[in-house]
Amino acid sequence: MTCEAVILAAGLGTRMKSARPKVLHTLGGKPLLGWVIEAVTESLGRAPWIVVGPEADEVRAAVGEGGRFVVQEERLGTGHAVLQAAGEFGEGVERILVASADMPLISADTMRRLRETQENHDGPFTLLTVESETARGFGRVVRDTEGNILEIVEAAHASPDQLAIRELNVGAYCFDAEWLWAHLPELPLSPKGEYYLTDLVAAAAAEGRSAAAVSVEDPIEAIGINTRAHLAQAETALRARVNRRWMEAGVTMLDPETTYIGLEVEIGPDTEILPNTILEGRTQIGEGCVIGPNTVVHDSEIGDRCQIQASVLEGATLEAEVLIGPFAHLRPGAHLERGVHMGNFGEVKNSRLKRGVRMGHFSYIGDATIGEAVNIGAGTITCNYDGEQKHHTDIEAGAFIGSDTMLVAPVRIGRRARTGAGAVVTKDVPDHAVAVGVPARVIRKLKPEDE
C-alpha cells in the first residue's frame, strides 16, 4: 500500500513580521520546514513533495537538491495548495499524507500512527487532533452525540459555543488518495476567498462517512508556529525535552530552564551543566566535567574531568583535566592538551598548548605551539600578524615567559629559556637562555641549578 506525502510550505507567515519565509525560521537551530521533512521522510521512507509559493528561492536553496517542489502560484488556501500536487502521483498511490511546515514538533512516530490508522480505517481520511486549553488559532473539531466528526470550524468563523470546544485540529491528515482527488475540486469558497482543506470533513459527513481521528500523545507536538511568541513556546518545549533526555542519561543540570543544548551535542555521564550555559553544534563533552555558568561552547570537543567557567569556546579541542576561565575565549584551532590551565581573560586561536601549560590571565596566544610545562606570564602576546600574513611562534618545553612579553612572530623560544617582564622578543632565544629588554637580547645562559 503506497503512501506519499505533501508538505504545505507556501504561506507568507505575515504575523512573523519578517523578511525571511516563516518556514525558514529556526527551532533548535534547524529550519521549521527541516523538522517536518525529517519526520515525514522517516515515517514513510521517502521524501515528500513540498508546496511552495512562486517566490520560494530561499526555501528551495535551504532544502537543497533533493527537494521535490510544487508551486502554488496563487495562495488560495490549504485545499488549493494540496490540489497543486495532484499531478505528481500515479495510480499506484493509495494514500496521501498531508502536513504543514509550521508544525515542526510532530514526530515521525505520530506521522506513522496517522498513516497506520488510515490503513486500517475504511473512511475517507484520518486527521490529527489534540485536547488543549490553548487554541493557538486551531480549528475546533465538532462531533455529534455519537462521537462522529461532523466538521472542522476555523477559529475565525466559530460561534462562542464552538470556541469552547477543546478538541483541536492540528493540521495533519492521511487521505484515501482517490477520494481526496475527487473531492478537492468541489471544495466551497470560504468567506476569505480560500479553499480550506478542513471543509473535506463536512464533505465526508454529508456522504454519511466519518473521518477518523488520532490524538497526539505529547501535547508539545501540537505547537504550531504562527508568531514569534509561538516560536518561543516551541523552543521552551523543545529545550525541556532535550534537557530531560540528558538528565535521564546521567547529566546534572542546576537550572534546566537556563540550559540550552543543541540537538547534535553529546555529553558524558556525571557532567554538571551550570546555569546560563549554551552548548551548540557538534560539541562533544566527556565525563565528570563542570561546564558553566555563563558559558558558550560551539563545535568543540571537551575531554573528561574538564572545568570551564564563564567562557566561550568555538571549534576548540580540550583533552582531559583542562581548567578554563573565567572569561576565556578559545577560537577555532585551539587545542589544549591534558592538564592545561588557562585563566581569566585569555584567548587562544589556532594554537596547541601541550601538557601542563599554565597560561594565567590577560594573554593572547595565536598561531603558536607551546611546549610541555611552559608558563605563560600575564599579558603575554604572540604578535602573529604583520599586516599581510600570519606567522608562527614556537615555545619549547619548560620555558618561562615573563609578564607582558611581546613575541613578534616568526620566533622561537628555546627549551627552558626565559624572557623578562616587558620583553619584546624579535629574534629567536636559544635553549636555556634569558632574554630581556626592548628589543629583547640574551643576557646570560642558565645553569642547571638555575632552572
Image: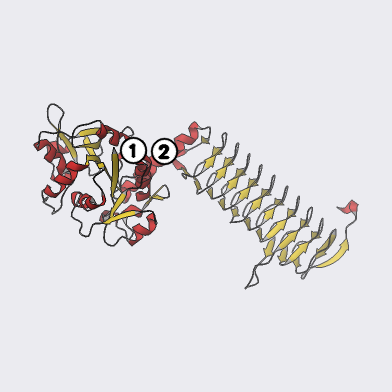
Could you say which disc has been placed on residue 240 in the image? 2
Q: Name the mark nearer the viewer: 1 or 2.
A: 1
Helix or strand or loop: what does disc 2 sit on?
helix
Q: Residue at x 32, y 51 (%)?
A: 228
Q: Earlier in the sequence, mark 1 or mark 2?
A: 1
* Crowd around label 1: few <14 · some 14–19 · many ≥20 (10 Å): some
Instruction: Give residue 64's quadrant in the image.
Output: bottom left
Classify 217 as above or below 11.
above
The amino acid type, in three-letter code, at marker 1 is Ile
* Residue 22, horizontal then vertical, whole percent: 31, 54
Q: Which residue is mark 1?
A: 220
Distance of mark 1 from mark 2, alpha carbons? 10 Å
Q: Residue at x 18, y 37 (%)?
A: 124
Residue 244 shows in the view: yes
Instruction: Give residue 304's quadrant in the image.
Output: top right
Do labels 1 and 2 touch, CB within 8 Å? yes
Classify 311 as above or below 431.
above
Classify 384 as above or below 398.
below
Residue that protrudes farthest toward the bottom in the picture: 388
Residue 189 horizontal side relative to residue 18, left or right: left
Tally the numbered discs: 2
